[in-house]
Image: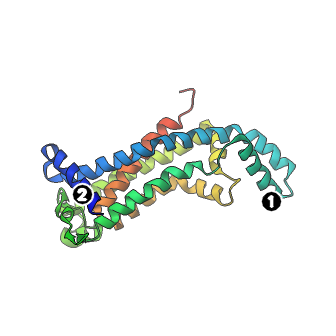
């Protein structure tokens, strides 16, 4: 933990000439970008995997007709088809799973006054008027919705809402232009995956709740990562004709 604190402080020192008092916040954004850059190859692999699953949809439709009265046999046949074609139905989950430790690390560091027996100086840093270790409830207590810290959160909420709206519209557009891709994303060969995929376009809106309840530093990670995901998805899943 102490090593991570020193890393963020080092980033903040490097960015201080450009961002001054908000250098630590900028360092967290930079850290998030580096994490997403490291995970990007897996995101590209996940996109290729989804396109490969889309290509299998006609054969999966045939299996559904063949085993319409035997759901268990259908599930086994579909999984066998994926194994034969070397396509993983769960490959799209890896990028999200590998990002979780980075988020939890930020959450832990900015939730504790001391790290490794030393005072956690990162808690003294701010994003404008909002301390990086505070939550939205702290901002409301300190100055209300339109106080200095409250306005920082209103700005973050506005950004998250814009990203969520973009993701929702992108999902609708991809579904309309490529039904096979949407069917592949549904993942009906994995129990429960189809239901999860149907609500995926709305999950970005739940990021509003996350931003409100976690320390501001962790909220910055979430907002930056969500924005990266939106841009990445728009590029990786765009129709080939575009």
Tell me the quadrant of the picture where the N terminus can be found: bottom left
Q: Is residue 32 left or right of residue 177?
A: left
Helix, strand or loop at mark 2:
helix
Tag of residue 93: none
Q: Is residue 57 above or below residue 89?
A: above
How many residues crowd around disc 1 within 10 Å: few (fewer than 14), some, or many (20 or more)?
Answer: few
Give how far apart the Cα atoms at labels 1 and 2 are.
51 Å
Q: Is residue 8 above or below residue 140?
A: above
Q: Are marks 1 and 2 in contact (CB under 8 Å)?
A: no
Nearest the eye: 216 or 1: 1
Q: Position of residue 134 (x, y in %)?
A: 25, 67
Helix, strand or loop at mark 1:
helix
Q: How many marks?
A: 2
Q: Is residue 119 left or right of residue 196?
A: left
Q: Position of residue 95 (x, y in %)?
A: 49, 50
The residue at the point 18 percent across, 52 percent down is 22
Q: Which callout, 1 or 2, points to the residue nearer the camera? A: 1
Pointer 2 residue: 152
Q: Quadrant of residue 33?
A: top left
**Res. 63 in view:** yes
Nearest the eye: 30 or 148: 30
Work out which residue is located at the far top of the displayed protein and give it.
241
Which of the two discs, 1 and 2, labels the residue nearer the N terminus? 1
Q: Position of residue 170 (x, y in %)?
A: 50, 42
The residue at the point 60 percent across, 36 percent down is 177
Pointer 1 residue: 72
**Res. 162 in view:** no
The residue at the point 51 percent across, 37 percent down is 236
């Amino acid at each position: 933990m102490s090593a991570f604190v020193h890393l963020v402080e080092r980033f903040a020192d490097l960015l201080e000439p450009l961002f001054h008092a908000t250098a630590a916040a900028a360092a967290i954004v930079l850290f998030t970008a580096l994490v997403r850059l490291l995970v990007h190859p897996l995101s590209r692999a996940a996109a290729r995997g989804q396109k490969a699953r889309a290509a299998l949809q006609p054969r999966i439709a045939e299996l559904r007709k063949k085993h319409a009265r035997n759901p268990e046999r259908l599930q086994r046949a579909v999984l066998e088809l994926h194994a034969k074609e070397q396509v993983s139905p769960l490959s799209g989950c890896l990028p999200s799973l590998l990002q979780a430790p980075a988020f939890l690390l930020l959450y832990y560091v900015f939730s504790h006054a001391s790290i490794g027996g030393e005072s956690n100086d990162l808690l003294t840093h701010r994003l404008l008027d909002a301390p990086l270790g505070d939550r939205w409830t702290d901002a409301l207590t300190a100055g209300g919705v339109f106080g200095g810290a409250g306005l920082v959160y209103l700005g973050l909420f506005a950004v998250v809402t814009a990203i969520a709206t973009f993701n929702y519209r992108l999902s609708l557009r991809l579904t309309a232009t490529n039904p096979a891709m949407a069917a592949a994303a549904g993942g009906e060969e994995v129990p429960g995956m189809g239901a999860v995929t149907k609500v995926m376009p709305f999950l970005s809106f739940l990021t509003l709740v996350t931003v409100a309840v976690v320390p501001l530093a962790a909220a910055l990670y979430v907002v930056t990562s969500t924005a990266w995901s939106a841009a990445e998805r728009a590029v990786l899943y765009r129709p080939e004709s575009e």
